[in-house]
Image: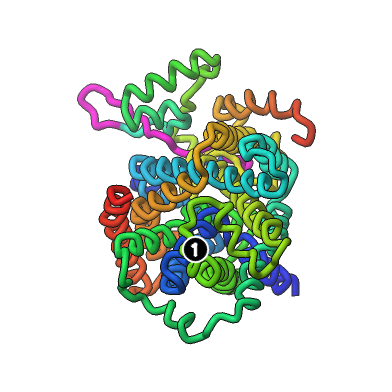
Amino acid sequence: MRKLVNLALGIITSIGGFVEVGSISTAAQAGSEFGFSLLWAIAAATLFLAALAEMAGRIAAVSKRSMAGAVRERFGFHFQIVPLGAELVIDILLLTAELGGAAIAVKMLTGIGFQWWIAPIGLLVWLVLWLGNFSIIEDGVGLLGMVTLSFVVAVWRLHPDVGPLARGFIPTIPHHDLTRYGFLSVSIVGATVSPYLLNFYGSGAIEEKWSEQDLWVNRLTAFLGMGFGSIVAMGCLVTAAIVLGPQHVQVNSYEQAARMFVPIFGRWAVTLFALSLGIGCFGAAVEITLNAGYVLGQAFGWTWGVEKRRRDVARFVTAFSIVLLLGVCIAAIGFDPLKVTLVSVALTVVIMPIIVLPFLVLMNDTEYVGEHTSGPIGNGLLAALTILGALMAIVVIPLELLGG
Amino acid sequence: MRVVRDVLDKAVVDRNGHEMGRADGILLALDDGRAPRLDAILIGPAALGDRLHPAIGRFVRALERRLGLDSGRPVRVRFSDIERVEHKVRVRLAAGETAVEAVEQRLRGWIVKLPGSR
């Protein structure tokens, strides 16, 4: 029974924690510019994310190793420094964007400039990490994140035609702006399959002391939780397509994106959008900061974890505090959070192979997963998709930047 | 035992199961006319720095010296002190007998002053 409750909670928190600055901005842009036709990208990226998260959970449950720890042991420090460095850079960029997104949400609610809110939000993130244990952090973020279901409610009230909606799940070549379409599909993958999510998920499995008996919980949490979670991102895309598409609004700011709620929620539109954006971004900022502590602690062999007394994990606490401080300082300079988001999600896809390919090796090594190795079809598909995505990113991103 | 595969980069735990860090380096002893001999596991960022580039190792050592954290670091754990090698390397020492926790203790000294650290 307790396991079922944990499973339900895991799925709910996955739904509540799914959308954040990257998924909201890429889905809003995709919907407003290309209608429903990029829904397939969210579906494919979610499947990809769920498959990777399940693997990270499986390694954690079977071998009690985190991904960062396993990569160092299996491939050595010379290899690990590359994905570790890349992940930290992307973590800090994304953290900057999340803090900015949360601050813009507060600005929408209060009218006071977003830069004033960066430091208080950063402090709040730190307090949650300083005072909370893993379940408070994960469940609290996830439960508050249920407000993001506003995107699903919006779609329900807009009554979209099922036919065109279903056609959006089939990849098609658009009649206009092929480069932009490619760029947005790559960005959706980058926003969905964030490296921090994978390591965070595996580390959570260790914090919660999963064992081989929890492999089915792992599989269901990964696929159902993220599957349902992606419905929220899809809701954002569909709402943007129906409301902003006909107005030819190209989403260049979060204030513009908020307009998608106006026909549905009237005077509550800005409040609901701001709460969805703010809570989504705040939750992600907490998880990214914590993940930075996790990867550093695991890679260098420090004692780590939010289940332990903070005085017993001093290096871990110091590491995540420094990363958070860096994120706050960069965000406070005043970079446009939307631009930072798009840069970080594009970079994510470029570095994806060096994050994902070690997974594939580890998932076939009995020392790490015992008898629970992956099958050849799953392996091949994942490797091919990763490399294809990265190649696409390398081609499309410069084209988009040159075009822009 | 294949030392790079089985020991290098693995987590090291002391006799009480307490984490000591990772095997950041391996020290070989070279005696005249004899084959190199496994001497010790090195634990500490300076050993890790040496592996990336000697200049990085020198920088980390200088930094540790400046912060007064260099005494007994990087920590050497003799191969004769290894109890067994599984997915972690278990050694017969206690972490407290070595300087592996020097940085942790320095930071702990500050962290315990904050409310909620216990």
- Could you tell whether B117 is left or right of A45 in the image? right
Crowdedness of circle 1 by 10 Å Cα count: few (<14), some, many (20+)?
A: many
**Residue plotted at (49% across, 19% down):** B64
Comparing A362 with A244, the one in front is A244
Q: Quadrant of residue A319?
A: top right
- Could you tell whether A298 is left or right of A402 in the image? right
Q: Quadrant of residue A358?
A: bottom left
- Could you tell whether A355 is left or right of A23 in the image? left
- Could you tell whether A167 is left or right of A124 in the image? left
Comparing B66 with A20, the one in front is A20
Residue A221 against residue B69 in the figure, above or below: below
Colour style of the rendered protein structure:
rainbow
**Residue plotted at (67% across, 41% down):** A121
Comparing A169 with B32, the one in front is A169
Question: Label 1: which residue?
Answer: A27
* Magenta highlight range: B15-36
Residue B109 against residue A356 in the figure, above or below: above
Tell me if I can see residue B111 in this picture.
Answer: yes
Q: Chain of mark 1?
A: A
Question: Could you say where residue A4 lies in the image, as x and y percent from the top left?
Answer: 70, 74
Circle 1: element type: helix
Comparing A235 with A58, the one in front is A235
